[in-house]
Amino acid sequence: MNELVIDEKEELVMKLLHYFITEKGYNPIVLHGGKDEIWLENIEDNNEYGVVRIVSGYIHNNEQFSFDSYKTKQIIKQIKKKTFSLSINTLSIYVDLGDNVKLESTDKVDCVYLSNIDDIDKYDNLKINFPTLKHNLNIKEKGINLFSKLTTEINKSNEIKAKKNQDIFAPRKPIVTYTLIIINVILYILSLVIGKNTMVGLFGLHPELVKAGEYYRIITCMFMHASTTHLLFNMYALYIIGSQIESFFNKFKYIIIYLISGILGCLFSMIFTQTWSVGASGAIFGLLGSMLYFGYHHRMYLGTVIKSQIIPVIVINLIIGFSSSSIDNAAHIGGLIGGILASMMVGVKDRDDKIDKVNGFIITVILVVFLIYLAFFMN
């Protein structure tokens, strides 16, 4: 049986892939038309380089290198648009250069040439940002043993990442969403029995009544609706958006996001509207804000969804709100802000660290205190 032979260049590429995927948590980027190059991203872990590019193709002269640099910048622009990133530092690793090629780093794109493992010592940026790179590339196995070891560990790392993503994106039964819908429907039916004006008078939001001590209205108004159309529109939106947020976060976090969004929506309404207000739309806009926050943290997967679906829905509904005097757009804006801050406070699984959550909590508390001051003491 012939032993598998891997040349030094292929071996080095495999070792680099193994290091960045298994040790540094980078993920492959699928490129259409990419040849003899592998793109990897990890824009979430505060790395110096959000993108690492391994070029295995032979670059034989400066003209070809210039074209490669231009192509790299164009692809990075597309990645920045997809990920809503103002800046992404990129590391291009070349493993096969002609003797006369002058390697030049450009703005936000650092270039290195590694013909072997020892070349790592020539680059301070590699030694500083990836101090274990040389050690991890120094693998003793050769041939079929090397290929088997690296591919097995890369596949295992990818399987773990896939399971994490599956756990995050797997649909779950939206029990809390169903419960919220049932409560809203029951209370609306009750309002039809005893009179909608009576129910709104008892539980709707009005700044003067809240300031008079009826603080419960800040919560109860979220479950009141003025008409059947109002109820159906909000409940449909709650079912669609709420089911996803409940799945992406967990039930407890979802309740926190919903209530904080609704409360901030009510405080904004008290400050800017100064009239009766009812409905779940403030809290629902908070869920849209939460979706925006979640999507940003998973923007490599949901970047297109954010641009084509989430943001247009938010903008269109705000425009509709500004065009109608009967819609409490202040509550919508307050809820949207509340959803983003509440999501930051409870955190996105495997994405936010403790500092992000603490900052979210502090900002939310400061904003709530400030809004209470404006609503109760300045109006």
Image (tube, grey):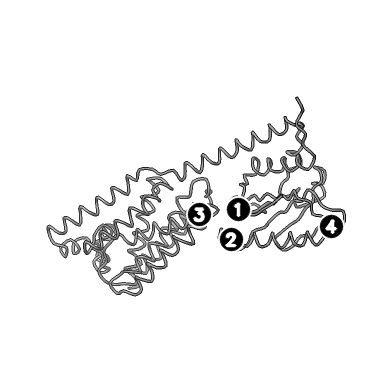
* Marks 2,3: beta carbons within 8 A: no
Is residue 259 rendered to the left or right of residue 92? left
Which mark is first along the chain, 1 or 3?
Answer: 1
Which residue does the image show at 37% across and 69% down from the upper left?
Answer: 374
Question: Which residue, given by chain and number where applicable, does mark 3 sit on?
Answer: 302
Residue 43: which numbered mark, if any?
Answer: 1
Q: Estimate the spatial distance between the alpha carbons at disc 4 and disc 2, rounded to whole Å.
A: 31 Å
Residue 216: which numbered mark, if any?
Answer: none
Q: Estimate the spatial distance between the alpha carbons at disc 3 and disc 1, rounded to whole Å.
A: 14 Å
Of 342 and 296, the residue lying toward us: 296
* Marks 3,1: beta carbons within 8 A: no
Question: Which residue, given by chain and number where applicable, does mark 2 sit on?
Answer: 85
SS type, badge 4: loop
Going by the numbered disc 4, the residue's amino acid type is Val
Crowding at label 1, few (<14), some or many (≥20) Cα neighbours within 10 Å?
A: many
Q: How many marks?
A: 4
Image: 268 above or below 303:
below
Of 209 and 234, the residue lying toward us: 234
SS type, badge 2: loop
SS type, badge 1: loop
Question: Which residue, given by chain and number where applicable, does mark 4 sit on?
Answer: 101
Which mark is first along the chain, 3 or 2?
Answer: 2
Which residue does the image show at 26% across and 71% down from the upper left?
Answer: 275
* Marks 2,1: beta carbons within 8 A: yes
Which mark is first along the chain, 3 or 4?
Answer: 4
Going by the numbered disc 2, the residue's amino acid type is Ser
